[in-house]
Amino acid sequence: MVDLIEDPHGAARAAADAVRRRLGVDAADLAFVLGSGWSAGSDAIGETVAEVPLADLPGFSTPVVAGHGGVLRLVTTAGGKRALVFTGRTHFYEGRGVEAVVHGVRTAAALGAAVLVLTNGCGGLHPELPPGTLTLIRDHINLTGQSPLRGATFVDLTDAYSRQLRDLARSVAPELSEGVYVQFRGPQYETPAEVGMAARLGGDLVGMSTGLETIAAREAGMEVLGISLITNLAAGISAKPLSHAEVVQAGLDAAPRLRGLLAELAKVL
């Protein structure tokens, strides 16, 4: 087996070969990564052709976060595309290294996926955008202190989140707002002071995923569409204590809207 840390791109190719054997597909057109609360909408993307537990594939493990699934599905969308649907992800705070965090993205790229849809549940920095709001990611600020890139690998992130894909998303859901996502390491929630810092830096959303995956996707030449479900107002914005139960509940409450958006996106991507 190819070592994920020593040769992350080789490990992704090995995982892609395993996907081909297990799912009976030569290549994929696009990929979805469904974050907290989003997995319940996976069947809205299209007709499931085959699936495999993520833990059965080289380099992957079962997601550890409540509200995430643990399956990779091959789906045929209403638009006739072959989509890989990851119902869950590895987070940087799990301690498996940045290579594990972006392994799914690189595996999808090794299977030929040209478009990547990254979803997450996040904290909101604006009271006028309450829990349950769906927001497109316009840009991100990476505060993890890490990168999936090695050596002199210079990747342009000027348009990290495709303007064309954001416009396409608004063509099916005109109400979608846009914001800057700030990725913290976690797993602790941000302090009110850290939330204030994120706002002063230009952030609108705070979370613990997505940014590192986007960097890897852009290295691979994939177009990225990022969508956040605001599950709670961030610390200091809301007087309520933060809890993961609130995040899970917000996902459950928003399930019909998540399903509807995923279904519409799958028709046009």
Image (cartoon, helix red, strand yellow):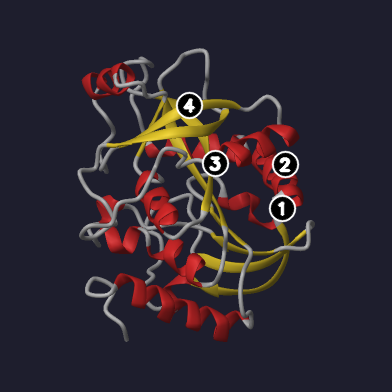
Q: Badge 4, how many Cα within 10 Å: few under 14, some, many 20+?
A: some
Query: Could you tell me residue 106's position as x and y percent?
Result: 43, 65
- Mark nearer the N terminus (1 vs 3): 1
Query: Mark 3: which amino acid?
Result: Ser
Q: Which dot marks residue 77?
A: none
Q: Confirm or deny contact between disc 2 and disc 1 (CB under 8 A).
A: yes
Kindly identify the amino acid type of the residue bearing the numbered disc 2. Answer: Gly
Q: List the residue tagged with mark 1.
A: 44
Dot 2 or dot 1, earlier in sequence: 1
- Which class describes the residues within 10 Å of circle 2: few (<14), some (14-19), or many (20+)? some
Disc 4 and disc 3: Cα gap in Å? 13 Å
- Foreground residue, 221 or 73? 221
In-image side of 132 versus 201 (left or right): right
Which numbered circle lies on residue 179? 4
Residue drawn at (41%, 46%) of the image? 210
Q: Please say if the residues under marks 1 and 3 sit with CB atoms less than 8 Å apart.
A: no
Q: Position of residue 2 (x, y in %)?
A: 31, 82
- Counting other residues with Cα less than 10 Å from the Cα at mark 1, is it few (<14), some (14-19), or many (20 or more)? many
Residue 221 or residue 207, whichever sits in front: 221
Residue 260, numbered circle = 2
Q: For the residues carrying marks 4 and 3, which lies nearer the camera in this image?
A: 3
